[in-house]
Amino acid sequence: MESDKSLLSAELNSDFEEALYEQMLLKAKQELQSRLPSVPESKQIRPQPGFCIKTRTAENTKIFINICKTTDIPAPPDLSEAELVNILESDDPSGYRVPMSIGEPHVEVDNNGNGCTAYDIVINSSFFDKIKSNELFREFFVTVAMEGLENKYEMELSREWRMLKNRKFMGSISDQNIRTKSKPIIQEMDTSYSGKPQSKPLITEIQSSPVVPEYSIVAEPVEGHPSFLVAEISLPKVSSVKSLVLDLGEDRIVLWGRPDLYHMDIFIPYNIIQEKSGAQFNQNTKVLTITMPVQPL
């Protein structure tokens, strides 16, 4: 049977273009990483005691949560009570995020001589002062902190809790290593890309209600635990990288396209190395490509 040479030629060209694209993407990623500032992945901090709350798990196990403070963790945006209420009553209350460091569980002995488990959660010192003096912010933060513990340690906590009056913490407070997160720099590319793109600063605060863009995420390698993930996000309405705001969490991608163009907030199935991730926006294809190294097992 005679083969279709035109089809074969098209397939060869397609394979060649795909291989060329992957090679260019890898080269761009390597060049991007070489341009990113070298920062330590983590630093050790010594939290200061704040207050301690007591609650229980769904299995009725006693839990203590030491709320600690430090100036080494950034504070969330400063809000009034009315602004916090508006956020909590909105369709997306997750828009207000509180930076915190959740420590490992440590076994302690309570006042009755019984064993218990304690956790240390560290927040910014100025935000601590706010929740200490404001009941609404304190209730909100404790709820957020419990959700953080539940997500990290896969447990269920009772929302009935009380603050201990006579002690600031249960057991001892240990030093913690906090991630020195470096936000990815979005770089703009066009057909005249010379291999030395100019970095664009990120704007970190934005409020809008745009649409979710089309996207795809590919793991490399495809089988087994990946070394890195590549996300491609189609943004046809974006005219400049200046209108993009990108924030990467350990397992989350948050992207805004201003004004009121796009909003993307998704979780990814692996923990990534935030400070080694990078992003590039192709001015011609209107595609944002994010390369995210994955935490090893």
Image (spheres, rainbow, N blue to C red):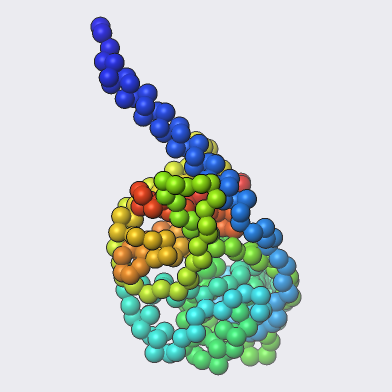
Q: Quadrant of the N terminus?
A: top left
Q: Nearer the viewer, residue 167 or 188?
A: 188
Residue 75 higher or lower than 198, as above or below = below
> Would you identify the image quadrant in which residue 71 lies?
bottom right
Q: Is residue 236 left or right of residue 164?
A: left
Q: Is residue 198 visible?
A: yes
Outermost residue on the bottom side: it is 133
Q: Is residue 93 left or right of residue 202?
A: left
Residue 5 higher or lower than 221, as above or below = above
| Residue 219 screen position, x and y as percent | 48, 42
Going 61% across and 56% down the picture, which residue do you hit?
A: 36
Residue 289 higher or lower than 116, as above or below = above
| Residue 129 screen position, x and y as percent | 59, 88
> Would you identify the image quadrant in which residue 81 lies?
bottom left
Q: Is residue 249 visible?
A: no
Going 34% across and 80% down the picture, which residue do you hit?
A: 89
Outermost residue on the top side: it is 1
Q: How many marks?
A: 0
Going 29% across and 16% down the picture, which residue do you hit?
A: 5
> Would you identify the image quadrant in which residue 254 lies?
bottom left
Q: Is residue 132 left or right of residue 247?
A: right
Going 29% across and 63% down the picture, which residue do you hit?
A: 211
Q: Nearer the viewer, residue 232 or 153?
A: 232
| Residue 148 screen position, x and y as percent | 52, 68
| Residue 277 screen position, x and y as percent | 55, 54
Residue 249 higher or lower than 97, as above or below = above
